Image: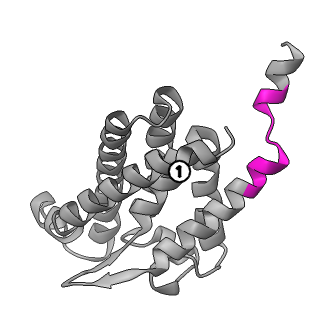
Amino acid sequence: MPQAEKKKNKLAVIDFAYIGVSAAILAVCSWICIPFTIPISLQTMGVCLVAGLLGMKRGTIAALVFILLGAIGVPVFSEFTGGIGIILGNTGGYIVGFIFTALIVGYVSDKCKGKFFPLVASMIAGILVCYAFGTAWFAVVYAKSNEPAALVTILGWCVFPFILPDAIKIAIAATLTNRLRRYIKQ
């Protein structure tokens, strides 16, 4: 492997700085809750923004750092919670799903250089994959301690109320990514 290619694959100090700041941004986005009939946090917007700005490798690592911090008990999740119990609980699959969202959004951002419409499409795809993974996780965990619920019931609890807020968050994240990406060292 040529020397230039080896350097490209390694993480530089600036990458660690971006990843650390981005994990902190994800925590802050998790803490911001807009009270409606269900609380709406800005977690999904944060994941889309971070992956769109940093790309697949750094964006996914930032999401992993965020999840690992929460898993060891740092209160980075919604409502200032943390701990492995949150990850293993009913809604933990949505948090783990952030990894897939970051992979999808980051990949498209890298390939399309932050162009708006491909970015929006990748954010929609990333959130849909997060919904699918989280909903499957919820169904399995919920069924262990309750009567199994129908898929449409679970979607009514976990997905349908979040579609419009997530669409708004995607629009904001894509716009911010499109405007800020030029300031991020790639």
Residue at horizontal 57%, vertical 56%? 63
Q: In the rendered view, would you say 117 is above or below 171?
A: above
Q: Secondary structure at mark 1?
A: helix
Left/right placement of residue 43 relative to residue 124 reads right
Residue at horizontal 36%, vertical 46%? 123
Residue at horizontal 20%, vertical 60%? 163
Badge 1 density bin: few <14, some 14–19, many ≥20, Cα 10 Å: some
129 falls in the magenta region: no
Part of the protein shown in magenta? 7-17
Amino acid type indicated by mark 1: Leu
Foreground residue, 54 or 181? 181
Foreground residue, 104 or 111? 111
Residue at horizontal 48%, vertical 57%? 47
Residue 71 horizontal/vertical position (percent)? 61, 70
Q: Please identify the dominant SS of the magenta region.
A: helix
Foreground residue, 180 or 44? 180
Residue 1 horizontal/vertical position (percent)? 84, 13
8 falls in the magenta region: yes
Indicate the quadrant where residue 142 lies: bottom left
Image quadrant where one finds the C terminus: top right
Q: In the rendered view, would you say 171 is above or below 120?
A: below
Indicate the quadrant where residue 11 lies: top right
Indicate the quadrant where residue 34 lies: bottom left
In the image, farthest residue toward the top: 2
Q: Is residue 3 visible?
A: yes
Where is mark 1, residue-wise?
Answer: 180
Left/right placement of residue 79 relative to residue 53 reads left
Left/right placement of residue 61 relative to residue 112 reads right
